Amino acid sequence: MLSDTEQLSDLIAAIYDTAFDHSRWPDALERTALFMNATGATFVAHDAARKEGNPVYTYGGDAALNERYFSETVKFNPALVPISLYREPGEVFHLTELVPIEEVRRSRLFKDWMEPSDWGDFTHTLVEKSGTRFSTFGVAHPLSRSPATDAVKDRLRLLVPHVLRAAQISNTMQLQRVEVDGMTATLDALGAAAFLVRAEGDYVYANPSGLKFLAEAGLLAELDGKLRPTGADAAKLLRAAVQASATDLALANQPVAIPLGSYAGDVWIAHVVSLRQGSRRQAGRRYDAVAAIFIHRAEVRRPNLVQVITAQFKLTAAEARVLFAILAAEGVAETAGVLGIAEETVKTHLKRIYAKTGAGGQAELFKLLLAYANPMVG
């Protein structure tokens, strides 16, 4: 019997495998239901305006009832509009938070689908949203354990950053129908910067976007063929992440996000993904690489980090702004300029942040973000 920690580690690895092989989703959802002590799990898409649903991947429940939901009952789902209007990617919520439980129990959604399936509540996170279209990842709870509790949301939050990152990598790579032998063409076509690296940090492949980012952004440098962030803290973290991908299978299960700094008005993040686990091993062998590095703008994840870390450490809104601005700026003076406040004010907020989080400096604040991106750390 796996411990809770081992179960979580295996589940996170399975979630990242779905980014490279979509056929792994059923296994990931089954593991999710087990980890969440739920009776169903889904990764589904909806359109609130059209009242339509697409069963991207599902686990649990009655197949006929599930099919009927997506063809008919979805039109009576009272949660579609609240989700599309009031929820953002990364937020975790119960169905019974969006719609009062009494209204849920009176709805066609409940009578035609939930009750016959022995489901009383759902806990989801919003993965992506565009206009009235959105996708969610979450679990279903039996009637006997409904409505769901805050403890259930806290448990799902352990998975949220990994689900969001896996979805973004999947969208970027578009590997669902691409064979490994065609990966070079796929990487070449990416708009995002991508590198494949060996354990020593030297890159064996960089796509055109990666070479452009390396030449222009000033956030990465090449030294004897090795990739090195120009920021000292980011350089240490990247080196550790790549080495872990090669030597530590437990750490390799859980990709990390490393803040690189600011370029062209945006904060940029390097996502380090091991190529030594699951369906990713084929790609690693093909290129003699241990890790893939994808570089993205941080705006998709930054609000989620703000919400969770602010709540966990009871930061004020002003402290949260300083925390995330300092990661993109070069020191206190630049942070003050970015936020339009005095340097002494920045220093005051930093002292309070250090006191609340227990961090001893900016390097430990970086590690704090990595601990959130990888809940198995610390």
Image: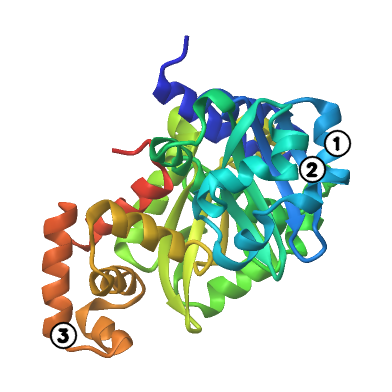
In space, the residues marked 1 and 2 are separated at their CA atoms by 8 Å
Labels 1 & 2 near each other (Cβ < 8 A)? yes
Secondary structure of the residue carrying tag 1 is helix
The crowd level at tag 2 (other Cα within 10 Å; few <14, some 14-19, many 20+) is some
Which one is closest to the eye, mark 2 or mark 3? 2
Closer to us: 107 or 98: 107
Residue receiving disc 2: 55
Dividing the picture into quadrants, the one containing residue 307 is: bottom left
126 over 7 or under it: above or below: below
Report the disc number at residue 67: 1
Closer to us: 191 or 352: 352
Report the disc number at residue 343: 3
Which one is closest to the eye, mark 1 or mark 3? 1
Closer to us: 356 or 378: 356
Q: Earlier in the sequence, mark 1 or mark 2?
A: 2
165 left or right of 319? right
Closer to us: 251 or 201: 251
Could you tell me which residue is drawn at 68 percent across and 57 percent down? 80
Q: Earlier in the sequence, mark 1 or mark 3?
A: 1
Image coordinates of residue 343 in percent, x first then y, are: 16, 85
Instruction: Please state which amino acid type lies under the numbered disc 3.
Output: Glu
Image coordinates of residue 305 in percent, x first then y, are: 40, 59
Instruction: Please state which amino acid type lies under the numbered disc 1.
Output: Glu
Instruction: Please state which amino acid type lies under the numbered disc 2.
Output: Pro
Image coordinates of residue 36 in percent, x first then y, are: 51, 29
Q: Earlier in the sequence, mark 2 or mark 3?
A: 2
Secondary structure of the residue carrying tag 2 is strand
The crowd level at tag 3 (other Cα within 10 Å; few <14, some 14-19, many 20+) is some
Question: Quadrant where the C terminus lies?
Answer: top left
